[in-house]
Image: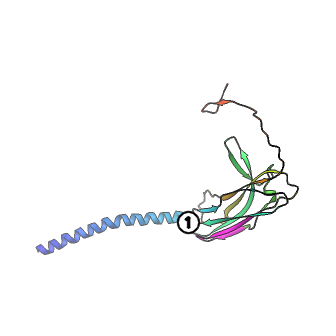
């Protein structure tokens, strides 16, 4: 009787310890399942290098290769495009635009592929060709090679979808007249109202 009581106490202790150990594991496995479910709709892309700064002579053709990697848990189809970049505001921000600009790099830039699919963990090299003709004026031209996910069927009804890109800052050498002038100087308060 005493031995049976002792065995019952030991078994109860072992079961209690087992439940304590299994409890956090079950919580961790549920967290992992939740993360995996969220990971199916998230995207995680890498691009290398993220920026090119180069000189390209008028009439010359230059090719640059970048690598895009899919670190997503599933395949992603990407659409490649090239856009111009314009400065926005006084804080150094930029905006990609498809229309011609005074710094129209898109006019002589092309990407070697329009759409492709990357499986989970796959990477691909993409080549951008810059070919300014002899009529292109010397100066700075700015653009971005963009890669935008398409054909996503796994997104919820409301979702934010990003894109990734590599900047191209190109200078066409030659005589350039550069200048600038100060149009206005003022002091602003924290609420952006001018003082004086």
What x and y, as percent, mark residue 32? Answer: 46, 65
- Which residue is label 1 attached to? 40
How many numbered marks are there?
1
* Left or right of residue 141: residue 125: left
> Considering the numbered disc 1 on the image, is that residue within a helix, a strand or a loop?
loop
Q: In which quarter of the image is residue 89?
A: top right
- Residue found 53% across the figure and 62% down from its top: 38
In terms of depth relative to the viewer, which is nearer, 128 or 20? 128
Q: How crowded is mark 1: few (under 14 residues within 10 Å), some or many (20 or more)?
A: some
Where does residue 139 sit, x and y in percent of width and height? 80, 50
Question: What residue is at 15 percent from the left and 71 percent from the top?
Answer: 6
Farthest residue to the left: give it: 2
The relative height of residue 3 versus residue 85 in the rendered view (above or below) is below
Give me the residue at 54% from left, 64% from top.
39
* Quadrant, the N terminus: bottom left
Residue at 31% over, 64% down: 20
Of 109 and 30, which appears nearest the observer?
A: 109
Viewer-closest of 52 and 20? 52
Q: Which of 19 and 166 is in front in this view?
A: 166
| Residue 2 appears anywhere in the view | yes
Q: What's the magenta bit mostly, secondary-structure-wise?
A: strand
Instruction: Report whether 134 appears left or right of 97.
Output: right
Query: Looking at this rendering, what residue extends furthest in the top direction?
Result: 196
Q: What stretch is highlighted in magenta?
A: 115-129
């Amino acid at each position: 009787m005493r031995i049976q009581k002792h065995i019952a106490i030991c078994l109860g202790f072992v079961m209690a310890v087992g439940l304590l150990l299994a409890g956090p594991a079950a919580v961790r496995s549920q967290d992992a399942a939740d993360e995996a479910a969220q990971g199916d709709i998230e995207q995680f892309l890498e691009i290398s290098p993220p920026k090119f700064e180069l000189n390209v002579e008028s009439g010359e053709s230059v090719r640059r290769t970048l690598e895009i990697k899919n670190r997503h848990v599933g395949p992603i189809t990407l659409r490649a495009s090239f856009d111009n970049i314009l400065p926005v505001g006084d804080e150094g921000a930029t905006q990609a635009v498809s229309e011609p600009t005074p710094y129209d790099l898109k006019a002589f830039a092309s990407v070697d592929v329009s759409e492709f699919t990357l499986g989970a963990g796959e990477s691909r090299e993409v080549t951008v060709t810059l070919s300014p003709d002899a009529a292109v004026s010397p100066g700075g031209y700015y653009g971005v090679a963009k890669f935008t996910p398409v054909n996503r069927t796994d997104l919820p009804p409301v979702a934010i979808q990003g894109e990734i890109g590599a900047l191209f800052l190109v200078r066409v050498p030659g005589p350039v007249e550069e200048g600038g002038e100060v149009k206005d100087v003022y002091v602003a308060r924290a609420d952006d109202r001018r003082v004086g």
